Image (cartoon, rainbow, N blue to C red):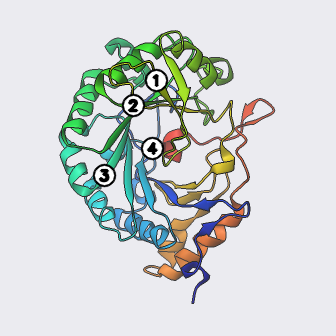
Amino acid sequence: MLQTELSPLIDKFGRTVNYLRLSVTDRCDFRCVYCMSEDMTFLPRQQLLTLEEMLFLSQAFVELGVNKIRLTGGEPLVRKNVQSLISNLGKLDGLDELLLTTNGSQLEHMSSQLADAGVSRINISIDSLCPERFTAITRTGKLEKVLKGIEAAQAAGIKRIKLNSVIVRGKNDDEIVPLVNFALEKGLDISFIEEMPMGDIGSRDRQHTMVTSEEIRAVINTAYSILPSTETSAGPSRYYRLTGGHSGGSNIRIGFISPNSHNFCDTCNRVRVTSEGRLLLCLGNENSVDLKAVIRRYPGDMDILKTTIVEAMAHKPERHYFYDDDKPQVVRMMNMTGG
């Protein structure tokens, strides 16, 4: 009997991994300035895992104790026939939560299908409420389309919807309070994410344009009183609640994801698999295991795949290190990693 049938995924620091972030594509219909360069070259389709391979791989992780899977990209909903994968994932025995991170561009016409397939929570990226600025940040996106997508997701009855905002100094740092106001108005959670120094975007020095979670909280406190909450979710957000009886405030959470200013690695419960099948043990390190090679060398062999995944846990580092001598250590773009 395989050891993998007896033990959950535990790394050498005693952390149990029960959360997989699966990137279904590196392609995206946006070109966000903090995520990728304007002139991107995407992977040839033959280098990507097939949807069937992604389902097989996901089944292996679930059998090893993973009970949460988040689909990411790129933009996951632009992958051809991705709905078939989502529907099949929703049927996996032992998977408690099927989650999605999206830019919202496809939600207007896909939200009902996602809800029917069992997607319980969706994170939607939105960095500006000004149409012109939104297009400048995303280079190709239209704010109106995303707003309609948010409304469609709410109408479809998705259990929990959270907005994700990356605040960049000099670009949208004057919209922190308006974004909180919007979340309150819509009754949605919102998380503010420190910009992650991944890949060479070439246009600016991220260390000087990154706005810390502490700075963002200070801005929010000029308009609202917020207090820390003990609540947690599948990811690394540290949540706060509004005080003072604001309309809708008791129902929404304001989260902060702080990979640069406040290391959260001691409680890390997740790994990533890229769209080309590389198992990333840490967002801020380049070490990885090629699961695609295992799947294609031993097609249909679940035991070998699960053994490879278990053995990879020994290489999960204690923490991330984004910089080496003030230079970004991670050279892959965020769209290649999976958001």
Label 2 packing within 10 angstroms: few (<14), some (14-19), many (20+) = many
Q: Which mark is residue 254?
A: none
Tag 4: residue type?
Phe
Distance of label 2 from label 1 (alpha carbons): 8 Å
Residue labelled with disc 2: 252
Labels 2 and 1 touching (C-beta < 8 A): yes
Distance from Cα at disc 1 to Cα at disc 3: 27 Å
The answer to which quarter of the image holds residue 202 is: top right
Give the residue at mark 4: 42
Place of residue 144 in the rendered image (x, y in percent of width and height, measured from the top left)? 25, 22
- Residue 135 lies, in percent from the top left, at 36, 19
Label pair 1/3, CB-CB below 8 angstroms: no
Q: With 110 as the anchor, is 159 left or right in this view? A: right
Decide if residue 109 is on the left or right side of residue 181.
left
Specify which label sits upstream in the sequence, 3 or 4.
4
Answer whether labels 3 and 2 touch (C-beta < 8 Å): no
Q: Is residue 218 above or below residue 257?
A: above
